[in-house]
Image: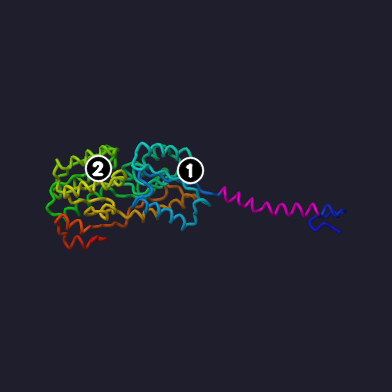
């Protein structure tokens, strides 16, 4: 009798038993090898935000990103490991979290908003970064051009200056008697995005015959409280609140103060209008988050972020709260209502 896989005869039954044992052992080991290979293929992706994980539109944006990744075959805990960092409006904590993510040597980092993107960019020039809802990618130094960003960043723009100008225009159309508008802004006003947005607002205000009254909150709740306390002395006709996670986390304070002073309000997040603000106008964050998952997938498969164009929003949403308008004694014109994507009765 000869060995079917060799040329030497098997002279003792023990030889065949050894062969069969070795074969069985290799078959049993095969799943372990496959499992080890799958473990090595697990992608490691970070997410950084100045905001909170579980509140309103921000939570919905995160959910859209996670769903987009699942649709592309990435399952957290299986072939994907996600590292979440949410700073809850605390800019000092944001910097700490950015350092933590930089130390992990991740394959891709997704950043929500300009502060998170700036913090991450300053710590890493190698890890690919996909940003979402960034106001001025070129002015902030995140991209050389929209078509060819170069470097290690790409993503999705908020077009902050255009949105801010449109906020002011829609506010005046809804409340024609407005001549003084208080603007609640956040962060360092010397930063590129703040300068761009503020300049766009000043130009728009000049064309509309509106005087702007600036209230700047750099980073703390105490500064926000002082700014809200100053509203009564400034006696504005309306309040425009720019987009910032700190404001969103404390939106009830802002809304309550505006209601107390009977101020028409415009916001850059739909949740404010749904919770009692007069109006909100903003790009669709969910669409950007879903598209960000596609960019993450491309980078994990070898694409360079600098070769992926920065996309600008194509979907915007105008929300008007007619219940609030009635409480303020306002009649919103049919032409403005016709442009609304959602009207709250």
Rendered-image quadrant of the C terminus? bottom left
| Res 170 → quadrant | bottom left
Separation of disc 1 and disc 2 at Cα? 33 Å
| Res 94 → quadrant | top left
Residue 1 location in percent, x, y? 86, 59
Identify the disc placed on residue 106.
1
In the rendered image, residue 115 lying in the magenta stretch gets the answer no
Q: Nearer the viewer, residue 206 or 58?
A: 58
Residue that badge 2 annotates: 185
Disc 2 crowd, CA 10 A, few/some/many (<14, 14-19, 20+)? many
| Magenta-tinted stretch | 17-40
Residue depicted at 33% across the width and 47% down the height = 134
Helix, strand or loop under label 2: strand
Residue 199 location in percent, x, y? 22, 43
Residue depicted at 83% across the width and 55% down the height = 7
Q: How many dots with numbers? A: 2
């Amino acid at each position: 009798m000869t060995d079917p896989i060799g040329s030497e005869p098997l002279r003792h039954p023990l030889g065949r038993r050894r062969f069969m044992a070795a074969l069985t052992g290799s078959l049993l080991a095969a799943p372990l090898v496959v499992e080890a290979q799958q473990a090595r293929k697990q992608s490691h992706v970070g997410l950084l935000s100045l905001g909170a994980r579980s509140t309103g539109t921000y939570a919905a944006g995160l959910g859209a990103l996670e769903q987009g990744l699942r649709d592309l075959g990435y399952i957290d805990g299986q072939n994907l490991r996600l590292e979440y960092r949410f700073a809850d409006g605390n800019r000092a904590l944001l910097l700490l979290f950015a350092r933590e993510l930089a130390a992990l040597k991740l394959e891709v980092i997704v950043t929500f908003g300009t502060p998170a993107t700036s913090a991450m960019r300053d710590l890493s020039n190698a890890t690919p970064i996909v940003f979402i809802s960034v106001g001025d990618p070129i002015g902030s130094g995140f991209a050389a051009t929209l078509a060819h960003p170069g470097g290690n960043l790409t993503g999705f723009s908020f077009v902050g200056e255009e949105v801010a100008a449109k906020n002011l225009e829609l506010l005046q159309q809804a409340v024609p008697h407005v001549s003084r508008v208080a603007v609640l802004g956040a962060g360092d006003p010397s930063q590129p995005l703040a300068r761009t947005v503020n300049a766009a607002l000043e130009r728009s205000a000049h064309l509309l015959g509106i005087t702007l009254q600036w209230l700047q909150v750099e980073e703390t709740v105490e500064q926000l409280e002082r700014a809200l306390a100053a509203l009564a002395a400034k006696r504005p006709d309306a309040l425009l609140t720019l987009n910032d996670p700190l404001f969103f986390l404390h939106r009830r304070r802002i809304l309550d103060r505006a209601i107390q002073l009977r101020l028409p309000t415009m916001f850059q997040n739909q949740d404010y209008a749904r919770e009692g603000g007069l109006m909100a106008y903003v790009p669709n964050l969910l669409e950007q988050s879903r598209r960000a998952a596609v960019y993450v997938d491309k980078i994990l498969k070898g694409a360079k972020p600098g070769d992926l164009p920065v996309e600008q929003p194509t979907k915007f949403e105008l929300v008007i709260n007619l219940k609030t308008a009635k409480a303020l004694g306002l009649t919103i014109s049919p032409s403005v209502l016709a442009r609304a994507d959602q009207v709250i009765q």
